[in-house]
Image (cartoon, grey):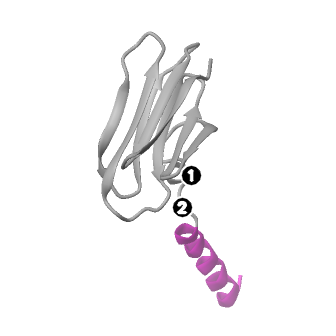
Amino acid sequence: MSAGVFGAALWLGVGGLFAAPPAQAATGGCPGRLVKTLPFPAGEVRVYKSRTQACAVTVAARPGERRRMTVVVQPRGSVPVRDAGQFTRYAGPVVVGAVNRCVHVTGSVAAESVASGWILC
């Protein structure tokens, strides 16, 4: 392999490390696949499902400004699990066990909010 080809391959490899974010960053740290998106004016709640877990993240429509954000996931028959605070981009992830269980998901950014009702049944 010549030095020019090797150098080009090295640059492509290094560029790939910086160009593409990790898959988990795209999901907000949630395991599983995206199964539902709950939009509302200030953002959206993304719900992910794996074989044994449900996970949710509230994502702000306009990231940058620090404001109150929450995400809550409640498996049917169990207590809700939440992440709340002053965030700039997203709240969560919140992961719960959801084998054969419906979940109720809510999320908010500032004064705007959304609720799912019972889903993933």
Is the Cβ of the residue at disc 1 closer than 8 Å to that at disc 2? yes
Res 29 visible:
no
- In the image, residue 30 sits, relative to residue 19, either above or below, namely above
Query: What is the magenta segment's predominant secondary structure?
Result: helix
Question: In which quarter of the view is residue 6 placed?
Answer: bottom right
**Type of amino acid at the residue the image marks with label 2:** Pro
| Magenta highlight range | 1-19
In-front residue for pair 100/4: 100
Residue 4 position in % (x across, y down): 67, 90
Please give the residue where the numbered disc 2 appears in the rendered image. Answer: 21
Question: On residue 23, which mark appears?
Answer: 1
Give the CA distance from mark 1 to mark 2: 6 Å
Q: Residues within 10 Å of mark 2 (few under 14, many from 20)?
A: few
* Residue 5 counted in the magenta span: yes
Label number found at residue 93:
none
Q: Considering the image in quadrants, where does the N terminus appear?
A: bottom right
Quadrant position of the C terminus in the picture:
top right
